[in-house]
C-alpha cells in the first residue's frame, strides 16, 4: 500500500494535464481566450488541494480510520472555500458567471474529485482488509 500515494500523484498529474490540454483545445475551437478565467491557477490549485487532501487522508488512515468520510467531506468543503475566496469574486464581477468561467474551475475540480474518490475507496478497502 506504500505505492498508493505515488500512484495517486501520477494519475492525478496525468489526468489533470490531459484535461487541461483538452480544455485549451476546446477554448481554441470556440475562439475563447486561452488564459482567461484563471484557468491555469484553477488546475494548479485543484491539483495541489487534491494531492494535499489525499496525502492527509493517507497518513491519517490508521489513526482516524473511522472518520475518513468526514475528513474527505472536509476536503471538499476546503475546495469550495477556496473557490469562493479565490475564483468567485472575479467570476461574479460582471454580474454573471459565464459557462467558460464555470468550466475553468469545475472541470479540474470534477477530474480531481473522481480520482480522489477512486483512490480513497481503494485505501479504505485495503484498510478494511487488514
Image (tube, rainbow, N blue to C red):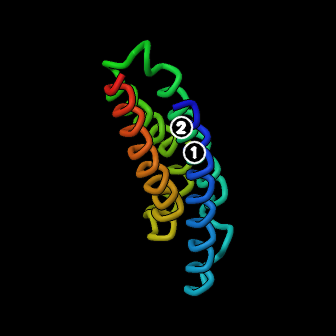
Task: Provide residue 111's location: percent of width, then percent of height.
Answer: 47, 56
Which of the labelled discs sits on residue 40, or is there none?
none
Task: Provide residue 110's location: percent of width, then percent of height.
Answer: 43, 55
The residue shown at (52%, 40%) is 82
Whether tag 1 and tag 2 are in contact, CB under 8 A, the answer is: yes
Q: Could you say which is closer to the camera, residue 88 or residue 75?
A: 75
Left or right position of 73 against 91: left
Quadrant location of residue 71?
top left
Quadrant location of residue 49?
top right
Task: Provide residue 101's location: percent of width, then percent of height.
Answer: 51, 64
Q: CA distance from mark 1 to mark 2?
A: 5 Å
Crowding around mark 2 (Cα neighbors within 10 Å: few <14, some 14 to 19, many 20+) is some
Crowding around mark 1 (Cα neighbors within 10 Å: few <14, some 14 to 19, many 20+) is few
The residue shown at (57%, 45%) is 7
SS of the residue under disc 2: helix
SS of the residue under disc 1: helix
The residue shown at (56%, 47%) is 46
- Give the farthest residue toward the top: 63
Q: Could you say which is closer to the camera, residue 65 or residue 48?
A: 65
| 73, above or below 39, in the image | above
Which of the labelled discs sits on residue 4, or is there none?
2
| 76, above or below 113, in the image | above
Image quarter of the C terminus: top left
The residue shown at (44%, 33%) is 75
Give the residue at mark 1.
7
Quadrant location of residue 62?
top left
Amino acid at each position: 500500500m506504500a505505492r498508493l500515494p505515488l500512484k495517486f500523484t501520477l494519475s492525478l498529474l496525468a489526468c489533470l494535464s490531459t484535461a487541461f490540454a483538452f480544455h485549451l483545445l476546446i477554448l481554441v475551437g470556440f475562439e475563447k481566450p486561452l488564459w482567461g478565467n484563471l484557468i491555469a491557477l484553477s488546475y494548479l490549485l485543484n491539483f495541489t488541494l487534491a494531492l494535499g487532501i489525499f496525502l492527509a487522508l493517507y497518513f491519517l488512515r490508521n489513526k482516524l480510520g473511522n472518520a475518513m468520510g468526514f475528513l474527505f467531506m472536509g476536503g471538499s468543503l476546503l475546495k469550495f472555500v477556496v473557490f469562493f475566496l479565490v475564483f468567485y469574486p472575479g467570476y461574479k464581477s460582471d454580474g454573471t458567471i459565464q459557462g467558460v468561467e464555470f468550466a475553468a474551475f469545475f472541470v479540474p475540480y470534477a477530474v480531481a474529485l473522481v480520482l480522489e474518490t477512486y483512490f480513497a475507496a481503494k485505501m479504505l478497502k485495503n484498510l478494511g482488509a487488514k
